[in-house]
Amino acid sequence: MEQQTPFILTINCGSSSLKFALFNHDDLSLISSGNIRDIGRESTIILKDPTGQLAEEIQEPVTDIRAAIQFLLKLIQESFTPYRLKAIGHRIVQGGQGHFLPEKVTSALLAHLEELVPLAPEHLPPELIAIRAFETAYRDIPQVLCYDTAFHRDMPFAAKHFALPRYLWDRGIIRYGFHGLSYEYIFQQLKQNAPQEADGKIIMAHLGNGASMAVMRDGKSLDTTMGLTPAGGLVMSTRSGDIDPGVILYLLKEKHFIGERALNELLNKQAGLKGISGGASDIRTLLEQENTDPKAAEAISLFCYQAKKYIGALAAAAGGIDTLVFTGGIGEHAPVIRERICDGLSFLGIQLDTAANKKASDIVSPTGSPVTIRIIPANEEIIIAQHTQHWLHSH
């Protein structure tokens, strides 16, 4: 019988999407990848080949995250018979205090993560569903959890703490930061391809449906825009970003928002670009509408203004800026948004090369510019695979 090639499966599970990738266990070469989008509606299932090119696109209803996982399980069992599953690596948005390093799933760890659901109500529930589904299907296969908060775990005291009584810090109410796996990949790419920049002052902008920024110096995270939960910081597609806590108190008292569920619906699902525009939450749709719809134009304006403001704040935290990196769906694919964010930041040395920006070149700043501006496509999956492989080799 022909020997099967062992592979690592990576899972990046959201409330309405499931990204996955299969990597050769030995050299982490990509075997295949895919994304199930718009779960709960008329979903799009995208399958890519090892080069990242589109192999197949399927339109069919996927009712919920469980159905998405069942589709993936069937795909693995039917289409990847020459391969043998060695381990599964998961992106986990929040592990709380004391859980930063990659670790194997246990019943105690799952119970701990269940307690943290209020800190990430949009992310942890589907992630936990995915873990349990794969545990049922592959009981003897190790599952390794990779935390999105790990990259920021050593942020300085002033960046990590809220101005709240210390006993609340002890209960885990601190600033964790997120998109850490994405930022880890960016740093890795800079070390490999631009080592002279890697130890400098780097601001990274992960702009997508969820959006955040982080600044690092000498390879360490100094500050980031998200805080206790992924709802803080920048304006996002449907999340409010930072908001005066007095607004919450006012809503509770005067507008009769009863309980956590209604507030969560407002701040995480009905706010952000969607709330400002009165409908659309996708930046591409808003750009198409901005010349005819003032609300769409205002949504884009507010998004870019907040991003610009945070670049200034993070540059102050680091004492300057040497490199600015755009990543994520908006950061990689929306040249107009990059241009509007960078406009007016020449006092920091930030200048765009218009032609390079339109082409989405690797570097979109002019030669000799004080700040190098880069586009680095997000790749959280390879970081998950690396951590999972390392865990396997050390256990």
Image (tube, rainbow, N blue to C red):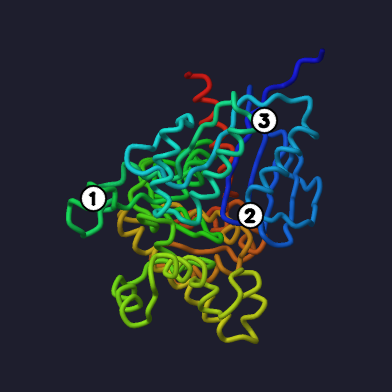
| Residue shown at 48% from the left, 29% from the top | 104
- The answer to whether 152 is drawn above or below residue 313 in the figure is above
Query: Which residue is disc 2 drawn over?
Result: 361
| Distance of label 3 from label 2 (alpha carbons) | 25 Å
Which mark is in front, 3 or 2? Answer: 3
Quadrant of the rendered image containing residue 25: top right
> Do residues under tags 3 and 2 come within 8 Å of each other at their CB atoms?
no
- Left or right of 131: which side holds 85? right
State the residue in front, 64 or 205.
64
Which mark is in front, 1 or 3? Answer: 1
- Left or right of 53: which side holds 158? left
Query: Which residue is disc 3 drawn over?
Result: 29
Of the residues shown, which amino acid type is indicated by label 3?
Answer: Ser
Of the residues shown, which amino acid type is indicated by label 2?
Answer: Ser
| Residue shown at 32% from the left, 72% from the top | 244
Q: Which of marks 3 and 2 is nearer the N terminus?
A: 3
Tag 3: Cα neighbours inside 10 Å, few (<14), some, or many (≥20)? some
- Left or right of 268: which side holds 89? right
Q: Earlier in the sequence, mark 1 or mark 3?
A: 3
Q: Position of residue 342 (x, y in %)?
A: 49, 67
State the residue in front, 10 or 369.
10
Q: Position of residue 281 (x, y in %)?
A: 58, 70
State the residue in front, 321 or 206.
206
Of the residues shown, which amino acid type is indicated by label 1?
Answer: Trp
Is residue 285 visible in the rendered image? The answer is: yes
Query: Which residue is disc 1 drawn over?
Result: 169
| Residue shown at 74% from the left, 19% from the top | 4
- The answer to whether 47 is drawn above or below residue 316 in the figure is above
- Left or right of 109: which side holds 365? right
Tag 2: Cα neighbours inside 10 Å, few (<14), some, or many (≥20)? some
Dot 1 falls on a residue whose secondary structure is helix
